[in-house]
Amino acid sequence: MQSAGLTPGRHILFSTAAVLFIEGLAALLPASPHGLHIALARPAQAAALILIFLKTPSGLSPLGLFSPLLYKGIKTGILWSAALGITTLASGALMVFLDRPVVGFFPSGPFSFSLLFTACVSGPLTEELFFRGVVHNWLRRYGRPLATGGSALFFALCHGGPELEFLPLIPFAGGLVFALAFERSESLAAPLIIHMAGNGFLFLGGYLSVIH
C-alpha cells in the first residue's frame, strides 16, 4: 500500500540523511582490512532507502522494477554490460601487450568475499537506489538532460578522493552510462546490472594488477 507521506523535497532530504547517518555509524566501527564495516553499512543503507521510497505517494514505481519495465531494464543492462565487458577485455589485453599495469580501483591483496560483495552487490544496489532512484528522479523536474548530467556529476564527485582529481573522469563516465541506461529503459534494473558488472571488472583488475 502506497503512502502519501513524503513530498519529493522531503524524499531526497530523508534519503540523504539516512545514507549519511548510517555511513557515520559505520565509521565508528573498528577498521577492517576486509571492509566489514562497509559491507554492513551498504545493505542497511539500501534497506533504509527502500523504506523511504515506500513512504512516498508513488512508492517503488519510479524505480521501474515491475513488468514490463523490469524486462526492458534487464535486457538493456545485459546488452550494455556485454559491450562494457568486451571493451574492458580489449583494453586489458592492450595494457598487457604494452607491458603496462592493469588498472583496478578496488584494494588489491588477499581475496575477500566481503569486499567482493560490497563492490559487486550491496554497493551498486545502494548507489543506484540513491543516485538514480532518488537524485536522478528528483532532477527530472528540471529536464531529463539535466537529470542525466547532474546525477552523473554528483556520482563522480562522491567518488573522488585525495588520489584523484577534482572530477574523477572514470566515475563520471560510469555515472553517465548508468544515467543514460536508466533514461533509456526507465528501470533501475539496467544501471544496476551495468554497475555490478562494471565494478566486477574493476575489482578483477585490482587483483590482475598484482598478478601482472
Image (cartoon, rainbow, N blue to C red):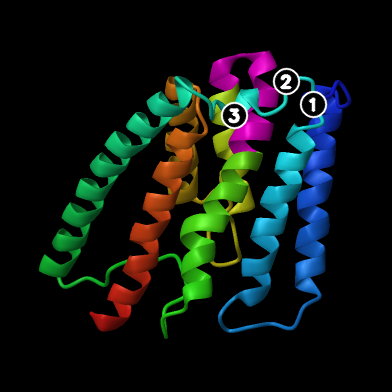
Residue highlighted by disc 3: 63
Disc sitting over residue 56 in the figure: 1
| Residue 174 falls in image quadrant | top left
Distance from disc 2 to disc 3, alpha carbons, whole Å, reads: 10 Å
Q: Is residue 135 above or below residue 207?
A: above
Distance from disc 1 to disc 3, alpha carbons, whole Å, reads: 12 Å
The answer to the question of whether label 1 and label 2 lie on touching residues, with beta carbons closer than 8 A, is: yes
Q: Amino acid at mark 2?
A: Ser
Disc 2 packing (10 Å; few <14; some 14–19; many ≥20): some
In this view of the protein, which residue sits in the foreground, 171 or 6?
A: 6
Q: Amino acid at mark 3?
A: Leu
The C terminus lies in which quarter of the figure? Answer: bottom left
Looking at marks 2 and 3 on the same chain, the residue that comes earlier in the sequence is marked by: 2
Q: Is residue 29 above or below residue 148?
A: below
On the image, the x and y values in percent for residue 207 come to 34, 75
Q: Which residues are magenta?
A: 131-146
